[in-house]
């Protein structure tokens, strides 16, 4: 297991190709995994996590966002656990396997007009489907951070069904973070572009058909990453971190933070025309991930992770990778917004001001409805982005509890998995892939969500290392 990385990545200058980030080379299936402790029999479902795992060496500079999407899954059933991992079988990965090399430039490379089939708002990158994984109906959708075409995946076998075009009606792209309403089964998403319309909003029915699409007017190209939903509304964002307009007109994609501009949050009825959107202003900020949102009287309440330094300068001593390293050193705080639909006013407050934590998850049954607890990845001060524990936030009181993974041990986004028959948003478990940098071995921790600071109730031993990655979800049996 310590030698499961490809030869070309071992000892790489780029830290996001080595150590806990190094790609693995095998697709594995393993049943009846050994367990330290006792695996609860009331934990039944699938834990899915997405992340970058490049097949071939990069053409030029490698950004962590460039790697080919790979899913890792742990299937829990009746006190037993099985593991499998699979690359997402994208159009791009098939072309590169045929060519035997990496074809596309990376996020830190200049565009290459000779390569066809580029994707994203930039228009020339490889759609790797490596960012998020969202349960939708009987399938899971693998999504990409720059907006791309979703890939439909069987959540149990991890077989890729192909591109999801919602009955052939999808004319644009899909954002990294789509929202599936647990009550109606609808899927809400947006996409952004460098040409007008700069933003569009969409709704697909539970049957997988695209039922609503509408453009949203913006002053120019923007870079929203996430959105929120409530029972009746969707919340879209116009935040002051985006491409420099003058440089963009010359084909140069340089992201800057325009601190003189407010953050704007657009609230729109779930299937309303884009012309009906109502904009609410707040302090300049950037938000990568929303915790949850809901309706409360005349207000929309939204909890989110607000980034403290949206556009870090980087340390020149770190050389050509300095800007990437700086942007990936997330520092965020849990923040609450209140948008009053009657008065048009915005109120905002910091829920907790001491914990650097991101990649939030909640009880998925409460998405768009009032929720109290958020389970987030604890971020240590380090040269690269790592998760060294799980922080449980009580958003009513502001109190926190932390489960630390231990020295040299780093985890993943950790979704809440309700016990069978559970009705409470803390009556269940937290699950996380954890890799030990000291041994190059991985396991899955199962933690009682009502006793976060206690040792795990079970540690499931994995047959191969799981590289650090991005987003995850829990799909109940």
Image (spheres, rainbow, N blue to C red):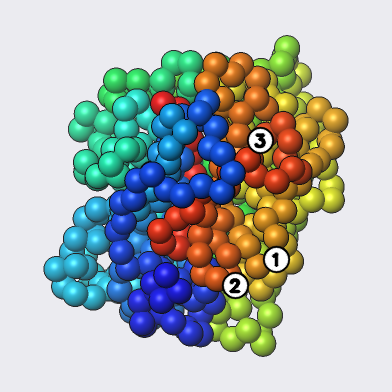
Number of numbered callouts drawn: 3
Q: Which residue is mark 3?
A: 448
First of labels 1, 2 by sequence position: 1
SS at mark 3? strand
Query: Which residue appears at 74% of the width and 66% of the height?
Result: 381
Query: Which residue appears at 51% of the width and 59% of the height?
Result: 442
First of labels 3, 2 by sequence position: 2
> Which part of the image, by quadrant, shows the C terminus?
top left
List x then y, in percent, for residue 214. 40, 29
Figure check: 331 above or below 19: above
Q: Nearer the viewer, residue 104 or 212?
A: 104
Contact check, label 1 and label 2, Cβ < 8 Å:
yes
User: For residue 27, which quarter of the picture?
Assistant: bottom left
Q: Which residue is mark 1?
A: 407
Residue 290 - label:
none
Figure check: 344 above or below 429: above
SS at mark 1? loop
Q: Which residue is mark 2?
A: 438
Q: Nearer the viewer, residue 270 or 165?
A: 165
First of labels 1, 3 by sequence position: 1
Contact check, label 3 and label 2, Cβ < 8 Å:
no
List x then y, in percent, for residue 161. 21, 41
Residue 189 appears left or right of 36: left
Q: Could you tell me how far apart the alpha carbons at marks 1 and 2 are, in whole angstroms?
A: 9 Å
Mark 1 burial class by Cα count in 10 Å: few <14, some 14-19, many 20+: few
């Amino acid at each position: 297991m310590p030698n499961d990385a490809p030869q070309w990545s071992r000892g790489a200058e780029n830290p996001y190709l080595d150590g806990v980030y190094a790609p693995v080379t095998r697709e594995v299936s393993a049943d009846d995994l050994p367990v330290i402790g006792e695996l609860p029999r009331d934990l039944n479902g699938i834990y899915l996590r997405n992340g970058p795992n490049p097949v071939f060496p990069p053409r030029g500079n490698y950004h962590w966002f460039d790697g080919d999407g790979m899913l890792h899954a742990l299937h829990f059933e009746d006190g037993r656990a099985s593991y499998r991992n699979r690359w997402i079988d994208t159009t791009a990965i098939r072309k590169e396997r045929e060519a035997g090399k990496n074809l596309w430039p990376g996020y830190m490379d200049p565009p290459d007009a000779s390569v066809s089939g580029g994707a994203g708002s930039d228009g020339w990158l490889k759609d790797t489907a490596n960012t998020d994984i969202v349960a939708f109906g009987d399938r899971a959708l693998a999504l990409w951070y720059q907006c791309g075409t979703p890939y439909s995946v069987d959540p149990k076998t991890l077989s890729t069904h192909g591109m999801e075009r919602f009955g052939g009606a999808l004319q644009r792209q899909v954002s990294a973070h789509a929202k599936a309403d647990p009550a109606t089964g609808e899927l809400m998403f947006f996409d952004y572009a460098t040409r007008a319309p700069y933003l569009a909003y969409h709704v697909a029915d539970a049957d997988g058909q695209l039922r609503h699409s509408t453009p949203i007017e913006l002053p120019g190209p923007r870079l929203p990453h996430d959105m929120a939903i409530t029972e009746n509304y969707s919340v879209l964002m116009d935040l002051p971190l985006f491409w420099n307009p003058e440089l963009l007109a010359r084909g140069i994609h340089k992201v800057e933070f325009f601190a003189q501009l407010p953050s704007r949050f657009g609230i729109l009825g779930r299937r309303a025309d884009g012309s009906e959107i109502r904009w609410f202003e707040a302090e300049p900020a950037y938000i990568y991930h929303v915790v949850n949102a809901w309706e409360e009287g005349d207000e929309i309440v939204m909890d989110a992770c607000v980034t403290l330094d949206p556009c870090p300068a980087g340390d020149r001593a770190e050389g050509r990778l300095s800007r990437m390293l700086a942007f990936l050193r997330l520092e965020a705080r849990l923040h609450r917004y209140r948008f009053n639909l009657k008065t048009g006013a915005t109120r905002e407050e910091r829920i907790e001001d001491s914990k650097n934590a991101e990649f939030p998850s909640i009880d998925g049954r409460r998405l768009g409805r009032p929720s109290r607890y958020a389970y987030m990845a604890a971020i240590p001060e380090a040269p690269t982005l790592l998760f060294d524990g799980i922080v449980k936030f009580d958003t009513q009181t502001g109190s926190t509890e932390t489960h630390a993974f231990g020295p040299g041990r780093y985890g993943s986004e950790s979704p809440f998995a309700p016990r069978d028959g559970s009705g409470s948003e803390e009556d269940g478990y937290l699950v996380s892939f954890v890799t030990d940098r000291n041994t190059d071995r991985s396991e899955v921790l199962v933690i009682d969500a009502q006793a976060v600071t206690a040792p795990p109730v079970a540690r499931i031993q994995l047959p191969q290392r799981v590289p650090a990655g991005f987003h995850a979800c829990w799909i109940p049996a």
